[in-house]
Image: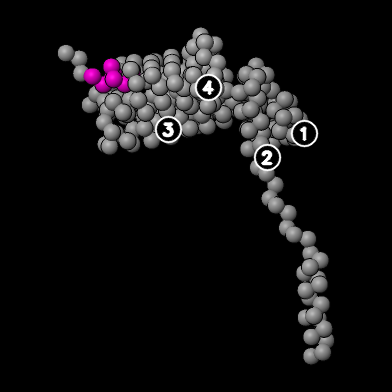
Amino acid sequence: MTASIRSARKAPAKLAGKRAPKPPAPDLRQRILDAAADLLREEGVAALSMREVARRAGVTHQAPYHHFADREAILAELVTGGFSMLADRLTRANDGAARHGPRRVLYDAGHAYVDFALEQPGRFRIMFRPELCDPARFPAAAEAGDRAHTELMRMVSIVHGAPDEALATLHWSQVHGLASLMVDGGLADKMPSASARRAHVDAVLQAYATMASTPST
């Protein structure tokens, strides 16, 4: 009994001497992807190499190969994530159709597209370049792209009453062209501040939504 009491009295001292558990190690795969996304945004696709990604992520030169076979595999993951983000934004715009009507859907979907390009310029620049990400080799990227296209067709159905590939291409080319001009084209040079670019995008999309949703006479 006495021995048991002594042991119990010593127990807190033993617990106090224990080290706190270490926090879980950060996801190495995600660190590599984050470093690649930052590199893509800041220096462009030409600067992205396995060695440079490893350096930025603060890992050994061989570490990326434990998660990605090569440079194209990293690009494919960034493309897949980009299309998933875009599809999510378009879904939210389309989901508002019942409350706001077709004009607002065009405006919101246009903003979803162009805002994504402005916020993720590195991803946007590589998402439509199959020579950088072969859809046959990376089906997940193709599936994510299909999901975004499905939302585009859904928007066309909301606005025009039925899916139509020609109308889908028409709407896509409008917002993709605006996004490209704002990211890399002449409009980006003329409007160096983010606030000026966003104000111009908003004005253009207001006009586009009004024209595209007005029945022809």
Give the camera-side residue of 174 and 104: 104
The CA span between labels 3 and 4 is 20 Å
Q: Main secondary structure of the magenta part?
A: helix
* Three-letter code, disc 1: Thr
Q: Secondary structure at mark 3?
A: helix
Going from N to C along the chain, the mark reached first, 1 or 2, is 2
| Residue 32 locus on image (x, y percent) | 66, 33
The CA span between labels 2 and 4 is 32 Å
Judge left or right: residue 70 versus residue 127. right
Circle 2 sits on which residue?
28
Give the camera-side residue of 201 and 171: 201
* Three-letter code, disc 2: Leu
* Three-letter code, disc 3: Arg
Circle 3 sits on which residue?
89
* Three-letter code, disc 4: Ala
| Residue 161 locus on image (x, y percent) | 22, 26
Going from N to C along the chain, the mark reached first, 2 or 3, is 2
The CA span between labels 1 and 2 is 11 Å
Residue 40 lies in what quarter of the image? Answer: top right
Query: Which mark is on residue 60?
Result: 1
Residue 203 lies in what quarter of the image? Answer: top left
Q: Nearer the viewer, mark 1 or mark 3?
A: 3
Q: Nearer the viewer, mark 2 or mark 3?
A: 3
The CA span between labels 1 and 4 is 36 Å
Q: Residue at x 80, y 80 (%)?
A: 9
Q: Nearer the viewer, mark 3 or mark 4?
A: 4
- 118 in the magenta segment: no
Circle 4 sits on which residue?
194
| Disc 2 and disc 4 in contact, CB within 8 angstroms | no
> Magenta segment, which residues?
208-214
| Residue 204 locus on image (x, y percent) | 38, 17
